[in-house]
Amino acid sequence: MSSESRTSLVRRARKVDRVLAETYPDARCELDFDDPFQLLIVTVLSAQTTDRRVNAVRPHLFAAYPDPAAMAAAPREHLEELLGPLGFFRAKTESVLKLSAALVERFDGQVPPRLDDLVTLPGVGRKTANVVLGNAFDVPGITVDTHFGRLVRRLGWTEQTDPVKVEHEIGALFHKRDWTMLSHHLIWHGRRRCHAKKPACGACPVAHWCPSYGEGPTDPVAAAALVKTQGPA
């Protein structure tokens, strides 16, 4: 890391978050859901596919199996058919069945609003748990997905690569009440401008505070061509 003081780092990080909040005023979870159970399931299903594909499957899935009891009792073949468009449908069917059964058996068919409980469920790690807590229960959480991890390292906020260490180190820079929206701001920025292979540096609203400026095109016209108006298809 640089010789930047702790105070300077906190100020810079919070300034970046404020600018990203202005840049992406509609930032939110891009997975559609109506209740905590739906959000838990669609978050698990979103692994190795896009939010848009999961959103397309969601209405049919929950029309057929609206709650954990119904989902746990679903015929495997029908679930596989519904989840087919997502890829890895057999593994995802197994995950959904086990997760739903665990909710019924251990939590009376309710999604628990505590991180310590959520991470005991099959297929649910801290990332998924924090998505559910922050967006379904308004419990602040930091979602360390690939975009979040990439951006906090590019921004020089941390050198950590372990998601749990990243979560704790970044959480210490911000007020807890800001954690959930911070996650949305960075994820939206990662999907729209700060791409993994070619970030749109010349069209970046936080370039002034980014030590990695120049990893992508700095020419405004070239960079503007890389900007996406929405998340991945």
Image (cartoon, rainbow, N blue to C red):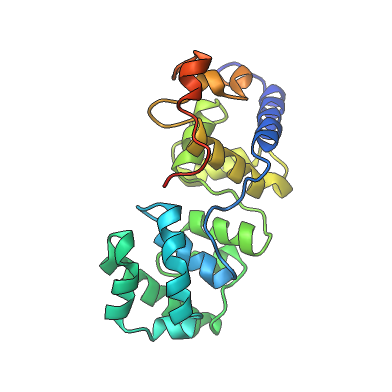
Say if 62 sits above or below 154 in the image: below
Task: Please indicate, yes or no, whether residue 175 appears anywhere in the rendered image.
Answer: yes
Q: Nearer the viewer, residue 5 or 42?
A: 42
Residue at 56% in and 17% down: 2
Residue at 63% in and 64% down: 136
x, y percent for residue 171: 63, 42
x, y percent for residue 160: 48, 35
Task: Please indicate, yes or no, whether residue 120 appears anywhere in the rendered image.
Answer: no
Q: Nearer the viewer, residue 27 or 175?
A: 27
x, y percent for residue 152: 54, 33
> Viewed as shown, does residue 94 lie left or right of 208?
left
Residue at 53% in and 42% down: 187
Q: Nearer the viewer, residue 102 or 57?
A: 57
Q: Quadrant of residue 7?
A: top right
Say if 216 sits above or below 190 in the image: above
> Viewed as shown, does residue 143 lie left or right of 5?
left
x, y percent for residue 203: 55, 22
